[in-house]
Image (spheres, rainbow, N blue to C red):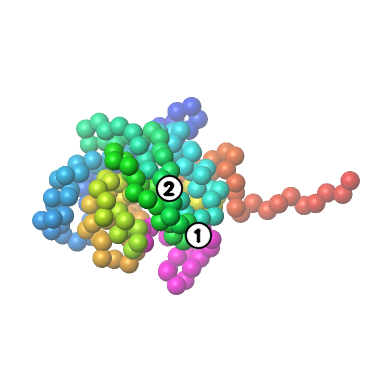
Amino acid sequence: MRFVFRLTAGLFALTLAASGLSSGQAALTPADSAILASQPLKRLVLTPSLLRRVSLLAAGLDREVVLCFQGAVAGDTAVVEDFRMPDLVSSAVDRVQPVPCPPGTLAVWHNHPWTGPDSSFGVKTPEDLCSLSQPDLLTVTADSIPFAVVSVGRTPGPILCWWRRVQAVVNRHVKFLPRFPRQWVQLPTLAGAPDPTAKPPAPSVP
């Protein structure tokens, strides 16, 4: 697994790569192995424009939404250049129900708004919120889209994590699938993004 950052026009392009499953996961069943063989994509490249747009979007949302990442495939690499937003059946601060993404979607993205620690779910920091819930896992495993991506928004620095679909399949019985140690990153605060920790200026007296 490696992260590759390229500075292009003042913005970061992010390459997420994995050579296989992370250590510590359950062994692959024959059905899981068939899924892995049918989805050989191992790398997900987010272009600078897309990375900035989804980070700014996540920073300003107070409820969950879904985006369908689209682009091109080259060998074992999916290059995402744009997205479309599907119709949403429902959307709340902690859940979202979209209609399915169209064929050819390379990754499904959704956001988790940071609202503070939640001891009932073991969430202490924004990084802990970069995870897939059981409903998320059911959605990911029920489809054939190769990647799942989560952004934690309303934080000073955008946090992004990702999973290959086969990783979700192998761990489909867990209540929460946390971020893997080398499959998440916190980006620098983007210029112009709202900082939820910033205090408003003191009122002035003319």
Real-space Cα distance between discs 1 and 2?
17 Å
Q: Can residue 76 be seen in this view?
A: yes
Is residue 67 placed above or below 120 in the rendered structure?
above
Amino acid beneath label 1: Val
| Residue 45 horizontal side relative to residue 127, left or right | left
Image coords of residue 39 (percent x, y): 20, 44
| Residue 5 in picture, x, y percent from top left | 39, 36
Q: Quadrant of residue 122?
A: bottom left
- Residue sitting at the far right: 206
User: Does dot 1 land on a helix, a strand or a loop?
Assistant: loop
**What residue is pinned by disc 1?**
93
Decide: is 185 above or below 172. above
The residue furthest bottom is 120
- The mark found on residue 87 in the picture is 2
Residue ID at (38%, 37%): 46
Start-end of magenta stretch? 110-133
Whether the magenta-drawn stretch holds residue 111 is answered as yes
**Residue 76 picture location, percent across and down:** 22, 36
The residue under the point 60% across, 53% down is: 196
